[in-house]
Image (spheres, rainbow, N blue to C red):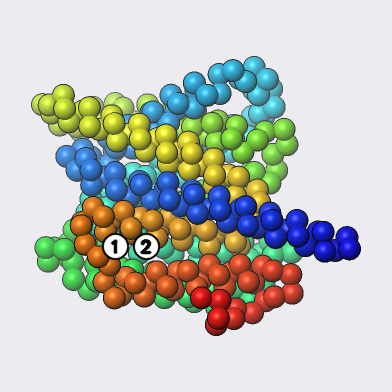
Amino acid sequence: MGASIAAAGGNKRTGLGILCGIGAGALWGLVFLAPELVREFSPLELTIGRYAFYGLISAAMIAPRWRALVPQVSRREWIGLCAIAFAGNILYYLLLASAVQWGGIAMTSLVIGFLPVAVTIIGSRDDGAVPLRRLAPSLALCAAGALCIGWQALAAPPGGNAGRQLIGLLCAIGALISWTVYAVGNSRWLERLHGISSHEWNLLTGLVTGAQSLLLLPVALMIGSAGRPAAAWAELAGVSIGVALFASIAGNLLWNRMSRLLPLTLVGQMILFETMFALIYGFLWEQRLPTAMEIAAFALVVASVLCCIAAHRGGAGRCEPQAL
C-alpha cells in the first residue's frame, strides 16, 4: 500500500515537472524569434535590452521580500548566482542572437537541440541516476532528430553564403556549451538551497543578470551605430520587455520548478521543447509549412522524450516502440 502511494506521488511529481518543462520550452522558444524581429540591432544591444528589463522586473517583484530574503543568501550563493547568470543569460543570449542573425533559426535550433544529450550525459553520473545504457535509445533519437532539424540549413546555406553560416554555427556551438554549464550548475544550486524558493532564486538571478547587462552599456555605446529613429528604439524596448517578462521571468520560473521535480537526466530531455517551439515560431515567421525532414525531426524529438520518461519509470528501463 505504501509503495503504491509512493509510486503515485512519484508519477504526479514527474507529470507536473514535464508540464513545467513544456511551458518553459514554449516561452523560451520566443528568444529565437526576437533577433529576427529587430534585425537592425546588434546581438549585444538585444542582450542588454532583454536583461536590463529582466533586472528591473525582478527588482520590482522581489522588493517586498528583500529584507527577509537577503540574510538567507550567503556570499557563496551570490558568487554562484553571478556565474550562472553570466553563463546562462548574458553569454548564452549574446551567442544565440548572433547565431540566429548569421545562420538562421533552423541552424541555431539544430545545435541547441543537442543540449539534452550534453546535460543527460552529465546527469547520468549522479548518484542513483538512471544508467546511461538505459538512456541510449532516447539519446540516439534525440541526436537523429536534431540532425534532421537543421539538415537543409547545413546542406544549403541561405543565400549561398557559407562564411556567414560558419560564423553562425560557431556562435551556436558556443551557446550550446554556455547553456549546458548553466543547466547543470543551476540544477545543482536548486538542490542545495534551503529556505529560498525557485521563484526567489529566479528573481535573484534576474537582479544579478540586470547588473551584469548594465556593465556592457559602455561597450554598446562605443560600437553601436547612432541615428536610429525613435520608432526603432521603441520596437526594441517592446521586444526586450516581452522577452524579459515571458521568457526570463515566467519561463525561468517554470524551469526552476521543473528542476526541483525531475532528475537531471530527465531535465536534459525537457530542453527539447525549446527547440520544438523555436521551430514552430520560425515556420510562422517564414509563413511556410515544415518540410518532410522537419516533420521527421518532430517525431524523433517526441519519441526521444517518451523514451527518456519510460527509462525513469520504476522498473521500466526499455523504450517500447508503441510509445508513439
- Amino acid type at circle 2 is Val
Q: What element carries label 2?
A: helix
Check the picture and name the quadrant holding the N terminus.
bottom right
**Picture mark count:** 2
User: Who's the residue at 67% across and 76% down the image?
Assistant: 317
User: Who's the residue at 56% across and 76% down the image?
Assistant: 323
Q: Is residue 293 left or right of residue 69?
A: left
Q: In this view, does 86 lie to the left or right of 80?
A: left
- Amino acid type at circle 1 is Met
Q: In this view, does 200 lie to the left or right of 161?
A: right
Q: Position of residue 227 (x, y in %)?
A: 10, 26
Q: Is residue 122 visible?
A: no
- C-alpha gap between disc 2 and disc 1: 7 Å
Compared with 100, 305 (above or below) is below
Q: Residue 255 carries which label?
A: none
Q: Which mark is residue 111?
A: 2
Q: Which of 157 and 19 is in front in this view?
A: 19
Check if mark 2's residue and mark 1's residue have beta carbons within 8 Å.
yes
Q: In which quarter of the image is residue 193?
A: top right
User: Who's the residue at 58% across and 44% down the image?
Assistant: 256
Q: Which of 138 and 242 is in front in this view?
A: 242
Compared with 311, 234 (above or below) is above
Q: Can residue 49 be seen in this view?
A: yes
Q: What residue is shown with label 1? A: 107
Name of the residue lying farthest toward the right: 1
